[in-house]
Image: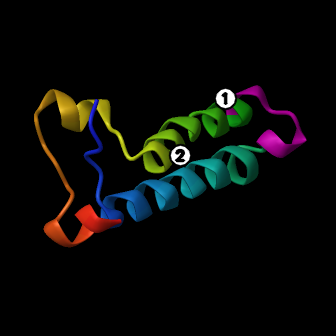
Amino acid sequence: MDINIGSTDRLFRILLALIIIYIGLIVLNGITGNNLGIAISFLSIVPIYMALSRKCFILNLFKINTITKRNLTE
């Protein structure tokens, strides 16, 4: 699979992961051992992986590329 995530999309995915971690650990009390909160926090692994690897299987499925010409040199 080719790289198909641009800089703005990467930033959005990292922020989304941080929000999911916050909701899971703080709002749903995962930090005190609530299983639902811990499970929700583990869901943040998906957007973090996609942001770091710059590959998204959903965008690849629909043949969408969010990389601009300026980002190709990164």
What residue is drawn where x is 43% and y is 54%? 13
Q: Nearer the viewer, residue 58 or 74?
A: 74
Tell which tag, 2 or 1, sits nearer the viewer: 2
Which residue occupies the extreme right position in the image?
32
Q: Nearer the viewer, residue 61 or 44?
A: 61
What residue is drawn where x is 10% and y is 36%? 63
Q: Which residues are magenta?
A: 30-36
Query: Label 1: which residue?
Result: 39
Quadrant where the C terminus sits is: bottom left
Q: Nearer the viewer, residue 40 or 16?
A: 16
Give x and y (percent) for residue 49: 51, 40
What residue is drawn where x is 66% and y is 29%? 39
Amino acid type at mark 1: Ala
Give x and y (percent) for residue 27: 69, 52
Looking at the rendered structure, the number of numbered marks drawn on it comes to 2
What residue is drawn where x is 25% and y is 32%? 58
| 50 in relation to 9, above or below | above
Query: Label 2: which residue?
Result: 48
Give x and y (percent) for residue 60: 20, 33
Q: Kindly check if marks 2 and 1 are in contact, taking CB atoms under 8 A apart as contact.
A: no
Amino acid type at mark 2: Ile
Q: Is residue 72 magenta?
A: no
| 64 to the left or right of 9 | left
Give x and y (percent) for residue 37: 70, 37
